[in-house]
Amino acid sequence: TQLLEQSPQFLSIQEGENLTVYCNSSSVFSSLQWYRQEPGEGPVLLVTVVTGGEVKKLKRLTFQFGDARKDSSLHITAAQPGDTGLYLCAGVGGGADGLTFGKGTHLIIQP
Amino acid sequence: DTEVTQTPKHLVMGMTNKKSLKCEQHMGHRAMYWYKQKAKKPPELMFVYSYEKLSINESVPSRFSPECPNSSLLNLHLHALQPEDSALYLCASSLAGTSGAPNEQFFGPGTRLTVL
């Protein structure tokens, strides 16, 4: 069974601060995805990382995939209240496998 | 069209009722998924359909019965549910299995189910 450890589980910071969320596993994933979820809504895909060492940027969000494809991080620069939400990392093997989710990071950005 | 739709948005049912959740996508995806999500927890995989065939059943109780009538539709039939089955039920789809594409899954908005 592939497991993903995500940390921190809860984070409350002030607007303008930077933060990093980590997602670690002992297993290799063919790809890893980051989602953001609002209460009562479905997860929205932010990014997919596929290649070991890959770095992708989405405005103030920077995503990194570890060289061995076992871990990933999400860094948010100058956090805004609109960044508040549940951030989920999810890994997948090949083919049409289901996603293995981390426990999620509940992020609150205070004005 | 780049979205997954789910109906109904909310559903309240008694333990003796029979109801169905519906999911639709028109992105040409050939893999579709049902997940269950309890409050403050991540989604948990229930079923995977690949090319309209059930490929994964994560030991889900038989009171949940999935159906894939065609490549765009996915249903979840519910019968004799328990109050602990109350949750957000999420449908997702992906291109997985086609042309070596990464398994990017796109989720619908979910159905909030309450079992009384």
Image: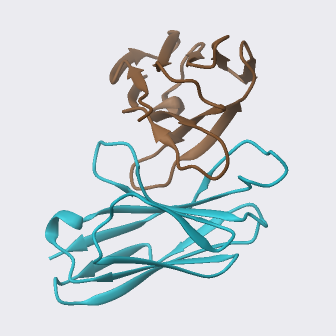
Name the one closer to the observer, A96 or B23: A96
Q: Residue at x 45, y 46 (%)?
A: A38
Q: Residue at x 17, y 63 (%)?
A: B84
Give x and y (percent) for residue A24.
Answer: 47, 18
All told, the count of numbered labels is 0
Q: Nearer the viewer, residue A78 or A91?
A: A91
Left or right of residue A35, residue B60 in this image: left
A74 above or below B24? above
- Place residue B55 in its image quadrant: bottom right
The answer to which quarter of the image holds residue B115 is bottom left
- Residue at the spot 80% in from the left edge and 55% down from the top edge: B98
- Rendered-image quadrant of the N terminus of chain A: top left
Which quadrant, please, contains the C terminus of chain A?
Answer: top left
Q: In the picture, residue B77 is in which quadrant?
A: bottom left
* The chain coloured brown in the image: A
- In terms of depth relative to the viewer, which is nearer, A70 or A105? A70
Residue B59 placement, left or right of A61? left
Up the image or down, B33 lies above or below A63; here it is below
Give the cyan chain's letter: B
Residue A51 placement (x, y as % from top left): 75, 22
Residue ID at (65%, 16%): A64
In this picture the colour scheme is by chain
Give percent across and percent down for residue B12. Answer: 26, 79
| Residue B17 in the image, given as x and y percentages of width and height | 23, 90
Left or right position of B52 against B60: right
Is residue A27 positioned above or below B41 on the image?
Answer: above
Q: Single out the residue that lies furthest toward the right.
A: B99
